[in-house]
Every structure is written in C-alpha cells, then in structure tokens.
Amino acid sequence: MATLGVIALLCASVALTHAYNARHEVRKFPDGFLFGTATASYQVEGAWDADGKGENIWDRITHTNPDHIMDKSNGDIADNSYYLYRRDVQMMRELGLDLYRSSISWTRILPSGFPDKINEAGVQYYNNLIDELLKYNIQPMMTLYHWDLPQKLQDLGGWANPEIVTWYADYSRVVFKLFGDRVKYFITINEPYLVCNSGYGGDKLAPALNSTGIGEYMCAKHLLLAHAKAYHIYDDEFRPSQKGKIFISFSAQWYEPISDSAADVEAAHDANQFEWAQYSWPIYSETGDFPPEMKKRIAARSAEQGFPRSRLPEFSPEEIELVKGTSDFFGLNHYTTNQIYRNASVPQFNVPSIEDDLGVGSYTPIEWQLSETSKTKYVAWGFTKLLNRIKDAYKNPPVFITENGIGTRDGMNLIDDDRVTYYRGYLDALLDALEDGCDVRGYTAWSLMDNFEWTDGYTTRFGLYEVNYDSIYRTRTPRKSAYVYRELLRSRSLDHHYEPDLTQPLTIAPGH
Ligand SMILES: *[C@@H]1O[C@H](CO)[C@@H](O)[C@H](O)[C@H]1NC(C)=O
Ligand SMILES: *[C@@H]1O[C@H](CO)[C@@H](O)[C@H](O)[C@H]1NC(C)=O
C-alpha cells in the first residue's frame, strides 16, 4: 500500500509540474517550426473592380444586399492591400515572420472565371506581392480558393454544378503555372465546411442559397473532387520541377461531450465527424469516402422523409481513388470548443438540414468567454484534444495550423490583453500536443491585421495590427499582441511573463 501511495504521489507531482510548466516556465518550440500570419484576398485587398478584376460572389452579395452584413459594409476598399502591400510586408518584417499565408482572387486573374483571358494587371499584383515577400525571406503560402467564387460561375450553379471540378482544375493549373516557381505552399480550398454549409445549405455566407439538407452535400462532393483534381495536377505536372507542398485547410472546432453519458459521447463524436471529418475522412481514411456515421444518419433521415435515396451523394470507386491521400499537410483552422449533448431537449431544426441530420444540442459555458467584448470563446485544452484526435484517427499526419485567433468587439484598442491571453493559451496547448507526439509543423495566426470579417463586416477584429477604417490611408498600428508575437518568434519560445515595452516602436526583425 505504501509503495502504491508513493506512486500515486509521484504521478500527482508529475501532473502538477506539467501544469506548472505550462504557466510559469519558458517553453521552447522545436527547431524548424514555422511561424506566420494569415489573411485572405477579399478580406484585405479592396480594389474590387480595379484593373480588369471580375465580379465575385462577395462583391455581389455586399452590393445587392448590404443588410446581409452587420454594419452594411463591404470589401470594396477593405485594408486597401492591393495598393498597400509593401506596408503589409513591412509589418511582417517587424514581426519576423517565416511565412505569410494569403489567397489569390480568382476573378483578379481570370475575370470571367474561365482561362480564356488572363488579366495581366492581376497577375502583376500577385507577382509584386510574392517578390516583395521573398526579398525579405518570407515564404508565401497561397490559398487558391478563400470563398470569392467568380459570380459568372455562381450563375451556373457554383459548387453545386459538377462541372466546377473542371473549372477549378483549369484555374488551379493557371495559378501553378504563373506562381509555382516561387510559391512552395499551396492551399487548394479554405474551410470547405463553411463554403458548403453556410453558403449552400445555409444563408449566412455568399451565395446564401439556403438549400438546407441538399445544397451543402452536393457542394461537399464537388468541392472534394475539385480539390483532388488540383492536387493531382500539381503532383503530376508541377511538383517534379516546382517541388512544393499542396494541401487543404479544414475548419475544425472541437466538440466535447457535455457529460460522460453514452448519448452525449456519441453526439460529440458525430459532431466532429459532421464538421471536419466530413472532409478529412475521404482524404485521410482508408475508405476514401464520407464518414460512416454521417452516411448512416443522413440515409436514415432521408428515408424517413420520403427521399428515394440518401441526400448525401455517393462517390464512385474511381472518385474514391481520386480523393484518397490528396493532402501533404492536414491544414487546420481552429478557434474554439463547444459542449455537445443529445437528449430530449435537442432543438428542432429545419427539415431537412445538416443540423437535423446531426441532431445534437450545443452549449458553451459563460466562463469560456474572456470578457464581454471577446467573441471567440477561449478553450485552449480543446485544441490539444483536437490535435490528439487527428493524430489517433489518421496515423499522425503532418499538421499545419493555418488559422487560429480571437475575434474581439472592442473597436480601436491597442492594449489587446484578451488576444495576448488567447494566443499564449492556444500556443501552450499546441506545445502540449507536440509533447503528446502530434506532428505539427507550423502556425499562421489569424490575422496579420484587422480586416473585413464577412457578415460581421468591420465590427469584429482579429488583427495583431489595428487598422483605422476612418482614415483613407487605412493606417496600421501594432497592438500589444504584435509585440508579444514578435518576441515569441525571436526567442522561438513561449514566456507568459514577457511584458513588452509599448513605448518603443516595432523595428525590422533581424534577418528580414
Ligand atoms: C432558409 O430556409 C429556412 C427553411 O428551410 C427558413 O426558415 C429561413 O427563413 C430561410 N432563410 C432565408 C434567409 O430565407
Ligand atoms: C439535456 O442535456 C442538457 C445538457 O446537459 C441539460 O441541460 C438538459 O436539462 C437535458 N435535457 C433533458 C430533457 O434531459
């Protein structure tokens, strides 16, 4: 008994040391771990119709239905990065970034959506940005599709039309040909779950089709095939000479059961499978198909509702082979965690809809909010759990964190302590996951600067740099979080006690 007591004591003290380390000691990131920041074309570029750019679905929705956006704003000017990209790169040099993630606007280089005509001015803009980054040792990471579909392709059905697989493949080939000599990280599609669920199955994001229970699943299938086609084009035609990486970025929150009852545990598992595994399972599992939990639930609900077949489309054996194994990194956009339950008080949803097919309720305790003005709930341990789930479910794939950050509704505010707390907590959780053996290779914080936050307009801010939208110069000013991030990158370690001297300007980091 005595021996057992000692062992128990030892275990308790190991656990305590772990928690103590996490909060009070400097923790080092592994050598070669890459740090950057992220943005996306529509959210920062502005110049919505400059130099021959074509109309996309966000131009259309913000112009025809301004009420769709909380402050009735749009991305016509946004951060004006089309003209101010040199200042953006200067900020990255101040932070000392290894890489910068942004996206290419499809209609800026192909105004009609098709490769019949390449818009040279648009190509020049991305060449200028890429060359400016490389000049200062910052690697570009470019997303091909971050939500701004050409309106002409939307008029033909967009992601619900199977032909989009070809349209997107053609576009991807143009991008690889134009930029792949210098861009070594390509992301095919950003957050498929939001593209399909909020744009096709729902009414939140453009094109807001609201085809609940139907549109999101048609979109999911075509999006996965389009991604896979682009992956193979890169792999076959460009990788041999360009030698880069290509992957997809999933949006994945963590869904935690609210209790340890079997029903809640299953509900949380299903929520994880419906959100992010909907897209990662076909690419990473042996089956090359949608998750079995999804197939089963949607088929059963479809039958009850009188549909002659499941509303979730099937993949042919050839399509399964096409999709399997098509991602060099598991791209991960992660923000928060929800508690999930399934019992008699699950709300009634639209019928049919993905919410109804999944059939769970969710709850987030008020304590998970850092303050009244912070929007993204702070639940850092959920990040560690998610990374461990990815490791266990998919044989420990290399992961790249392509988004993580906190949205705040505090307007102009340079002392952003909530953002500092959030980043420190989530990076600590990431270090925990690395200790657990998760293979995370890099991290790009969302976001370099405040930008157009979709239906929130400019009411929610995510920036390490504040942007002044009252000024025609869109002046950018580093927040406290920018100072903290710079020190983190300089030291390659996390020190919760570091207090920056905010009276000193941020100068260019050594090596940049
Ligand atoms: C979307 O469809 C649901 C019914 O499926 C309806 O309740 C909702 O009001 C619709 N939204 C819009 C913006 O029309
Ligand atoms: C369902 O679960 C939630 C979360 O635990 C709880 O608040 C609620 O009372 C439960 N409802 C029923 C009917 O059991």
Image (tube, grey):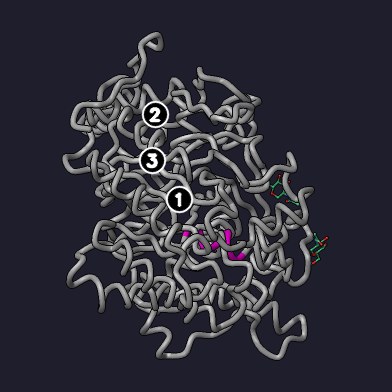
Which residue is found at the position 65% from the left and 49% from the top?
362
Judge by depth and name the residue closer to the eye, 247 or 217.
247
- Residue under the image location 45 percent in, 38 percent down: 84
* Rendering coords of residue 410 (x, y %): 62, 25
Examine the rendered structure and indicate whether residue 425 appears above or below residue 191. Answer: above
Mark 1 nearby-residue class (10 Å; few <14, some 14–19, many ≥20): many
Residue 4 on image: x %, y %: 24, 34
Q: Neighbour class for label 2 at 10 Å: few (<14), some, many (≥20)?
A: many
Q: Is residue 490 left or right of residue 86?
A: left
Q: Is residue 252 above or below residue 91?
A: below
Determine if the magenta segment contains residue 195: yes
Going from N to C along the chain, the mark reached first, 2 or 3, is: 3
Proximity of marks 1 and 3: CB atoms separated by less than 8 Å: no
Q: Under tag 2, what secondary structure? A: helix
| Residue at position x 46%, y 43% in the image | 382
**Pointer 1 residue:** 333
Q: Is mark 1 within 8 Å of ligand 1?
A: no
Kindly identify which residue carries mark 2. 424
Q: Amino acid at mark 2?
A: Arg
Q: Earlier in the sequence, mark 2 or mark 1?
A: 1
Picture layout, residue 49 above or below residue 365: below
